[in-house]
Image (cartoon, rainbow, N blue to C red):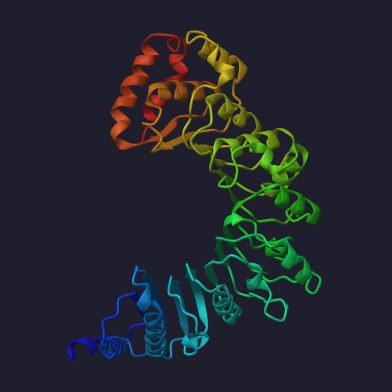
Amino acid sequence: MGDIKCFPFAKKIIVTIITDDIVFPGAKSNIINNALGFANLLMSVASTPATARIKCIHKRTQMDGENREHGALNEEILGLLFKILYGNTKHATLHLSYSNIQNPSTFDHIPPISSLELCGESSPDMCASLVRRFASTLQCLRVSISNANMLIYDVDDKAVMYPNLQYLGLSDCIRNTTDMNASSLNASNAIPFPVLRSANLYSLYPFANDVLFRGNTKTLEYLNFVIDKYAVTMFNKCKTFESKNKVLRHVLISDDWFNNDTYFGTEAETNKFLNHLVSAAERLSVSAAVVAKVCVTAAQNGQGFQNIKLFEMGSNMSLFDVLCALTVLPALVKVRGGIKGFGSELENISQEELPGYVASTFRDVGENLQVWSMNSFASQYSAQIVDYILLLALASPKFRRIEIMPNTVLNYYARVTEALESGPYSKYASQLTRLLDAAC
């Protein structure tokens, strides 16, 4: 004990507590005593830490007959641990994972929290109540909850404000337009997230209106979300992303909920929405080819994609689709992802004629493209990968760098060299030798 007290001025304490459903007869007092003894020992190391971060993970088992008793035991232990570990700390963070806490008094001794993560909590009411309790001090919030409306309206239907929240992650949400329509009548102008910088929505946009994006036009820099026809129509109606003062630099659009472009709604509505959404963005990320094609179509029918420098396109776009993307993304410097096939538009052209066709049809369309990052996709379609590289280079005069897996570098050099020495690419060898310095 004497040795452990040699750090009395420790400024941060990080604790991970793992519990399970197994309770042996008569073990309750021992568990509590051991837990409290550990906590007191730990606090002897850092008697007045400036920051305390506690992560509680509950491991479920099949011993359902004892779950209720052990759940109450967990709450009793956690309540006492919170009281000791948080102590007089000025800044606190908390992560609960499947803790199954039902009693709000468990959290009575927690100081104002700056970061809160709730995953797999069985009680939406407790979850929402805990979030609302610390709404005024939260800077980072990650929460899994079915009804996100409970986060922005309390039990009396009053708006909840998050004046310091900069990061928001929502998952497992179900859009509930009925509840929200009733609430919005009472707080239609509420701005709950005025300084939000990063929003990650891992399910469909959960609100009936644009409440998440109100008032943070000049702070929101990163947005990751799934869009559907409802969201497209609603955002257009609310003119959510039409401000010219946006600082939204990185947009990630996921496709988890659809597999064809009709899911977005009409082409005109989608084009309008996407062009406004990305008008200030320099980085556009999509998770599948179907979304990438929708974005390319939108870019062909608007001016919103003029600043995109990095396009993360997933792994299934054809070479033809990538070449078309280059024609409508004039600032593009880097593409990331895998190319699958030449595309039906190029497949009927012979291998001997293909380089000449691309060189004439897509000449200099990728005027600023410099890098293709294949990463893990390098070996996925290796049979045609050199063709893709050479054809992209013919359409992009500054293109010279390939990011590929280290174990494929030597093979890359050998195959590019061979292609430039004989065959249809040899006539372009003088302008394509820059590719031999491209891999890294």
241 relative to 252 in the view: left or right: right
Is 109 placed above or below 60 here?
below
Front in this rendered view, residue 58 or 136? 58
Above or below, 33 relative to 242: below
On the rendered image, what quadrant is the C terminus found in? Answer: top left
In front of the other: 347 or 33 = 33
Answer above or below: position of 399 versus 140: above
Lateral position of residue 347 relative to residue 277, left or right: left
Name the residue nearer the viewer: 415 or 121.
Answer: 121
Can residue 88 be seen from the camera position used here?
Answer: yes
Residue 189 visible somewhere in the drawing: no
| Front residue of 264 and 284 | 264
Badge count: 0
- Residue, far front: 65
Residue 299: image location, x then y, percent: 69, 36
Q: Indicate left or right for 184 with 378 as reference.
A: right
The image position of residue 263, as x and y in percent, is 67, 42
Task: Name the quadrant containing residue 322.
Answer: top right
**Could you tell me residue 276's position as x and y percent?**
72, 47
Residue positioned 37% across, 90% down in the render: 84
Q: In the picture, which quadrant includes the N terminus?
A: bottom left
Quarter residue 38 falls in? bottom left
Return the x and y of residue 343 as percentages of the image width and height: 55, 22
- Residue 384 versus residue 368 in the image, above or below: above
